[in-house]
Amino acid sequence: MMLIELPDFQTKNAAKPWPLQGRVSKSGKTMIEKAYHDRDGHIWMNGEFIDWRESKVHLLTHSLHYGSAVFEGNKVYEGEIFRLTDHSTRLVNSAKLLGYEIPYTVEEIDQACLDTLEKSGLSNAYMRPVAWRGSDMMGVASKNNQIHFAVACWHWGNYFTDKMKGIRLCISDWKRPAPDTSPCKSKAAGLYMICTLAKDKATATGWDDALMFDYRGRVAECTGAHIFFAKGEELHTPTNDILLEGITHDSICKLAKLRGYKVVKRDIMPEEMKDFDECFVVGTAAEVTPVREIDGIHYKPGKICEAMLNDYNDCVHGKIKI
């Protein structure tokens, strides 16, 4: 994340075309995140590198209007992209579920990501591969649109800071849809609309994130992370019939088994949440983040949370193989 400090007069008096997320620095001045369209660097786009500020798409891009872009979130640790090929494979499959083919193979997508990382000069970063339908035609029908693909890479700090303190989750008003109402196994842009609504309401009312139930009232996931509950040395996590196949989730299941923990994938009902000792969420951005409260239910992040947090950190840095 890139932050810039605004002078006092600019903070108080300047008209802003849109709100920018901010924080207060030690000097008392407002720190805002530098807009993503106005940065130095290059973005890999349709087979070539383009100046960051010139990587533009047309207003009438089909995926902008109809939500059919697909994307991945990759993390880079010490110059290595964690589980790169798994992410690239999921990206290709996400597009197929939405009815189109990305015009690059998994191997070519891997290479584009590696080239973008090298071009960026970063050794620890976040990476966003994304594919979308272009502006060749407008309307619900999409088949004559060209498919575009790009990769961007930038520095991004911790999604949640001071992790062992634990985060607080509220229960979202929004539910994850049924598998016959959306292509829920696709990491599609349109499916994140309710996640944005849930996250914005949560943070506006003093919570760190929101926990979503599914269409049957079962515990599902947070707005951008899967969830685990711990009791003794057992980890319980929701079944995945309506959830994205999480790469970090899979990593945690494998790491837990290496420790001798039993991993139980099952339906979890809301009334069960009070019966667990610990809770944590996982995702590429969230990594492993303990939870200390879910809407009045309190947990104490302990040895399970700490063990999985440390093991995952060792795994992404190549110290543990899965």
Image (cartoon, rainbow, N blue to C red):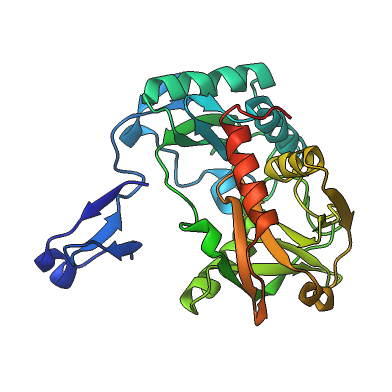
Q: Residue at x 76, y 69 (%)?
A: 213
| Residue 53 at x, y percent in the picture | 31, 36
Q: Residue at x 70, y 55 (%)?
A: 304
Lateral position of residue 143 relative to residue 116, left or right? right
| Residue 75 at x, y percent in the picture | 54, 36
Lateral position of residue 23 relative to residue 214, left or right? left
Q: State which quadrant residue 48 falls in.
A: top left
Q: How many marks?
A: 0
| Residue 109 at x, y percent in the picture | 60, 22
Q: Toward the viewer: 57 or 257?
A: 257
Q: State which quadrant residue 321 falls in.
A: top right
Q: Quadrant of the C terminus?
A: top right
Q: Toward the viewer: 143 or 291?
A: 291
Above or below, 110 relative to 57 = above
Lateral position of residue 88 relative to residue 241, left or right? left
Above or below, 143 relative to 178 = above
Q: State which quadrant residue 220 falls in.
A: bottom right
Q: Toward the viewer: 209 or 265?
A: 265
The answer to whether any part of residue 70 appears in the image is no
Lateral position of residue 62 relative to residue 44, left or right? right
| Residue 248 at x, y percent in the picture | 68, 42
